[in-house]
Image: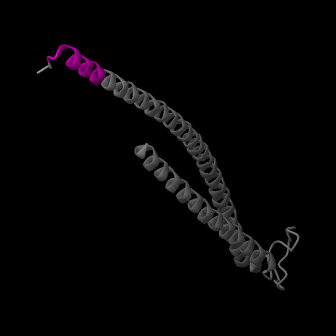
Amino acid sequence: ARALRLRLGEIELETREKAELERRLQLQLAECAESLESATQRLRQRPGSPRDADGVASRACQTGCESAADCEPQLAADEQLEAEIAAAKLALEEQIRGFSAERHRWLYEKRQVLAYQKQLQLNLVQLRSKTTRLAADVEQLNSELAEKETLLMRLRGQAALSGGVSER
């Protein structure tokens, strides 16, 4: 029973650690989503962005460029930002999948812990019941032994009185 309690304590500690890990991962996920949203907003709000606030591509720069060649450095920077945003989105999606997989694994382990705890409780109830039965059996046997010892002493006492010979 002590080994079971120790194992139960270990499992409960693991469960708390997994819950803390999930909490930290959720915070990290929220930070990544916020960072992605912030980068997207910065890209949309930049003057001369090839996309307006609605995400519709513009053909001409809004900075007063005289030709498309004048806008190329700005367009290259915008494309680089868009590539970074796409990479951040992919990383965020991958992180979300990882969090989801971790959550499923954690829930599976939690179910196992709960099943294990239930089995421990059942074993404890059975152990207590068996202990109670054994204690009753021991008490019954002690009572029978005491009766037999009393009867034996009476028989020896009667034999000593009637025969005058004692057992030695």
Tell me the residue at 85%/81% (across/down).
Answer: 62
Q: Position of residue 157 (x, y in %)?
A: 25, 22
Prevailing SS of the magenta stretch: helix
Q: How many marks?
A: 0
The image quadrant that residue 25 belongs to is bottom right
1 lies left or right of 157 = right
Viewport quadrant of the N terminus: top left
Left or right relative to 33: residue 154: left
Front residue of 49 and 147 = 147
Q: Is residue 141 left or right of residue 132?
A: left
**Residue 18 image position (x, y, % from top left):** 55, 56
In the rendered image, residue 50 lying in the magenta stretch gets the answer no
Place of residue 96 in the rendered image (x, y in percent of width and height, measured from the top left): 66, 56
Q: Residue at x 83, y 71 (%)?
A: 51
Please identify the residue farthest to the top as the structure is shown.
163
Q: Quadrant of the C terminus?
A: top left
Residue ranking furthest to the bottom: 64
- Looking at the image, residue 27 sits to the left or right of residue 9; the answer is right
Residue in the picture at 80% in, 75% down: 44
> Closer to the camera, 42 or 72?
42
Residue 102 drawn above or below residue 150: below
The span picked out in magenta is: 152-165
Q: Is residue 95 above or below residue 76?
A: above
Taking the spot 33% from the left edge, 21% from the top edge, the residue there is 151
Q: Is residue 156 magenta?
A: yes
Nearer-the-camera pick, 47 or 158: 158
Estimate the x, y position of residue 35 in percent, counting from the top left: 68, 72
